[in-house]
């Protein structure tokens, strides 16, 4: 049944209104700060949830005051600044501007709230430093009294502190010499550690979900364009999805700064501005669908504006790039209104799919307007364009489904006509047969696209693995059973140390689901921070992060830190097969401290059952060899006799190959495995890491 526009648009508008209401609801009516004091003494934070430190904060313009200079002294503030908001609006008129620096202070009455707490900072100017009761808790960049001394680094951070007294004194030094948004632009949330971490992780997970969805959809459309270049709409829409996917990593949680620690704030902000050029690719997409309704002159004007904006962002100093941003956003708004007019004309002319496309675009356009207002502090919501894109793609799927349905209906109709006229019109049968062949070819092309997607997924997964060995004494091999697999290994280097972290894991199951979980493990290791210095802490962190997010799968993992200076390895084991240690004439295993695989039990249950992850320390004999592996190696069975398992003779093979160099050892070991199997098709992924102990 045809979905009518009159039903779709009200539904979309209703969803938009509900989302707006949800984003701006007052919640539990938390208190607001007044004259630099916030009273939370009557609020049980652990019971009622985290609270925003919004309201009036003391603000000392052009003074970078330390907690010692403020604590217990009567230092009159320059004004009381609204949080969230620009400090330029605190009532000093022309005496204050966005370019400068200052100090915020807020006294929080905690009442009976005691113990470990955390707060999350999303956006404080371009550089800041935050103290709680004189303790340095969080910093972003380097605060300074001039632009040449200041280092920009404003990314969302979480700080943990202990509340012991009846009140907290929060002091924030902040400086900004580029942006038109200055001060504490977003709410600072305070709550228990679990509340804040849970909220942070939920935000990161949602952003990564949107990133993955948009990335897959973008790659899908680009691959479709490669297969059928006559339709440029697939290329434009694929490029649009990829650009917005990149934008999800640059806004909100700004996860790209975690993936690329050396990315400067200046470069990251320019990239964020350049992602707005996705608007032009979307205009090209609409133009390619409805050329008769979309004016070529309007396209040219917006194209020139986009090129000028992109060039200015790349060439001009950041200060000027920020100032031209509102003009391009205004141009985007005008272009969006014109797109709505174009789609309305297409609906009036009954163009196929126009009703659903205009419904999805109205939702997307509302998200664009929200993002513009949100970025200028007019409203306090969130960046919703990626979510709007997701809804638009969802409605696009209905358009595709309707096209597929019509194709299948056409095939059925043709079949009926063939039966009806088979005895009378042989030429009609031939004509219909040709049409059926065309439909079959289309299905074949779609099948090839799916195969190309899997090959692309394999290429992406291979990029997750280390490109090369981190040292001369380590070599590795990975052979997935399918195009993609669930085995994963990685090496971690430590600054100013020859130590090397060696990680190997095996996700239960096979194929794409296992590969997706393996990519989650890679992402978590990149964000592990100091956890990487301690194997047991690392596994506990991974277990907590993965629990409940693997769809019932579990992960065995082994993480060890090897120190070649003293030939010592410190390791922890989460249900993984113990590595072998091969010496001259002897084969043993690092089998101490083995615990439960990841993503099965939470940390408290592990401790209650005496199964917590622990560190084990071993010194390795010189001229030995450590072999890390997944079960695909030892559980390989002989094709001719399934009772023969490679594990039964793996120790003998290790002894025979001990004299070989690590690279030749790995290659010969794999050749022995293939010979034992009787073929190179395995029933599981095979991953082996060889570490030579030479010193």
Image (cartoon, rainbow, N blue to C red):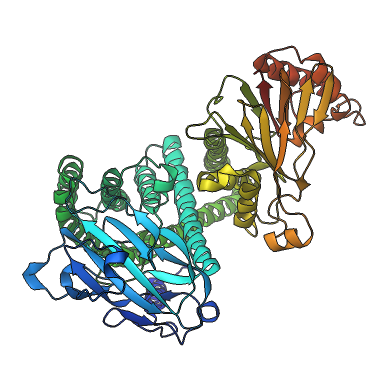
Residue 262 drawn above or below residue 678: below
Residue 187 visible in the picture: no
Residue 159 drawn above or below residue 498: below
Q: Nearer the viewer, residue 508 or 542?
A: 542
Q: Is residue 288 left or right of residue 410?
A: left
Q: Nearer the viewer, residue 199 or 139?
A: 139
Q: Quarter of the image holding residue 502?
A: top right
Q: Is residue 579 left or right of residue 326?
A: right
Seen at 66% across and 56% down, the residue is 551
Q: Is residue 455 left or right of residue 76?
A: right
Seen at 70% across and 52% down, the residue is 553
Residue 646 visible in the picture: yes
Q: Is residue 598 left or right of residue 309?
A: right
Which residue is farthest bottom?
42
Q: Nearer the viewer, residue 75 or 220?
A: 75
Q: Nearer the viewer, residue 659 or 403?
A: 659
Query: How many numbered marks does the figure carry?
Result: 0
**Quadrant location, the C terminus:** top right
Residue 599 % position (x, y) = 68, 54
Seen at 57% across and 50% down, the residue is 411
Q: Quarter of the image holding residue 154?
A: bottom left
Residue 663 % position (x, y) = 65, 17
Residue 664 drawn above or below residue 514: above
Q: Quarter of the image holding residue 262?
A: top left
Residue 378 % position (x, y) = 24, 71
Residue 510 % position (x, y) = 70, 42
């Amino acid at each position: 049944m045809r979905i009518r526009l009159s039903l779709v648009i009200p539904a979309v508008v209703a969803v938009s209104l509900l989302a707006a209401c949800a984003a701006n609801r007052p919640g539990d009516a938390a208190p607001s700060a007044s004259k630099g004091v916030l009273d939370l003494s009557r609020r049980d934070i652990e019971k009622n949830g985290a609270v925003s430190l919004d309201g009036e904060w003391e603000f000392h313009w052009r003074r970078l005051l330390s907690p010692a200079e403020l604590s217990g002294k009567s230092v009159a503030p320059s004004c009381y600044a609204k949080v969230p908001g620009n400090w330029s609006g605190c009532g000093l008129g022309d005496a204050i501007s966005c370019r400068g620096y200052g100090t915020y202070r807020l006294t929080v009455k905690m009442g009976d709230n005691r113990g470990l707490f955390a707060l999350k900072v999303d956006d404080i100017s371009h550089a800041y430093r935050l103290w709680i009761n004189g303790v340095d808790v969080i910093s972003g960049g380097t605060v300074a009294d001039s632009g040449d001394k200041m280092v920009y680094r404003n990314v969302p951070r979480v700080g943990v502190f202990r509340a012991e007294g009846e009140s907290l004194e929060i002091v924030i030094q902040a400086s900004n010499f580029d942006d038109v948004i200055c001060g504490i632009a977003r709410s600072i949330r305070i709550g228990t550690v679990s509340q804040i971490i849970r909220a942070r992780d939920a935000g990161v997970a949602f952003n990564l979900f949107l990133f993955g969805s948009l990335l897959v959809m973008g790659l899908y459309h680009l691959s479709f364009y490669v297969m059928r270049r006559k339709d440029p709409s697939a290329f434009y829409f694929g490029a649009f999805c990829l650009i917005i996917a990149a934008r999800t990593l640059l806004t909100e949680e700004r996860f790209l700064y975690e993936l690329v620690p050396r990315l400067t704030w200046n470069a990251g902000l320019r990239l964020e501005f350049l992602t707005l050029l996705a608007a032009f690719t979307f205009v090209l997409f609409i133009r390619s669908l409805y050329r008769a309704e979309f004016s070529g002159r309007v396209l040219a004007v917006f194209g020139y504006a986009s090129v000028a904006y992109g060039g200015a962002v790349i060439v001009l100093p950041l200060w000027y790039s920020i100032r031209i941003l509102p003009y391009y956003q205004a141009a985007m708004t005008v272009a969006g209104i014109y797109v709505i007019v174009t789609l309305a004309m297409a609906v009036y002319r009954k163009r196929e799919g126009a009703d659903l496309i205009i419904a999805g675009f109205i939702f997307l356009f509302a998200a664009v307007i929200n993002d513009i207002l949100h970025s200028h502090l007019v409203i306090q919501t969130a960046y919703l364009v990626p979510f709007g894109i997701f809804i638009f793609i969802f409605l696009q799927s209905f358009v595709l489904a309707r096209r597929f349905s019509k194709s299948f209906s056409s095939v059925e109709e043709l079949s009926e006509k063939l039966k009806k006229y088979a005895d009378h019109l042989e030429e009609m049968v031939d004509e219909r047969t040709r049409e059926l062949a065309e439909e079959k070819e289309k299905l074949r092309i779609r099948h090839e696209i799916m195969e190309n997607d899997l090959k692309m997924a394999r290429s992406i997964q291979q990029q997750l693995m280390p490109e090369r060995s981190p040292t001369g004494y380590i070599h590795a091999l990975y052979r997935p059973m399918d195009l993609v697999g669930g085995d994963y290994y990685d090496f971690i280097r430590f600054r100013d140390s020859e130590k090397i972290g060696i990680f190997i894991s095996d996700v239960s199951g096979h194929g794409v689901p296992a590969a997706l979980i393996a990519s989650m493990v890679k992402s978590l290791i990149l964000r592990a921070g100091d956890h990487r210095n301690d194997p047991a802490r690392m596994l506990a962190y991974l277990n907590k992060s993965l629990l409940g997010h693997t769809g019932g799968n579990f992960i065995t993992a082994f993480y060890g830190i090897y120190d070649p200076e003293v030939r010592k390895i410190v390791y922890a084991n989460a249900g993984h097969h113990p590595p072998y240690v091969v010496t001259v004439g002897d084969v043993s295993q690092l089998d101490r401290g083995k615990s439960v695989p990841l993503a099965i039990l939470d940390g408290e249950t592990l401790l209650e059952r005496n199964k917590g992850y622990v560190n084990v320390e071993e010194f390795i004999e010189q001229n030995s060899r450590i072999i890390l592996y997944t079960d695909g190696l030892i559980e390989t069975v002989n094709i001719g006799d399934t009772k023969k398992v490679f594990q039964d003779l793996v120790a003998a093979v290790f002894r025979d190959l001990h004299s070989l160099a690590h690279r030749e050892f790995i290659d010969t070991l794999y050749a022995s495995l293939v010979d034992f199997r009787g073929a190179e098709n395995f029933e599981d992924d095979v991953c082996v890491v060889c570490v030579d102990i030479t010193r």
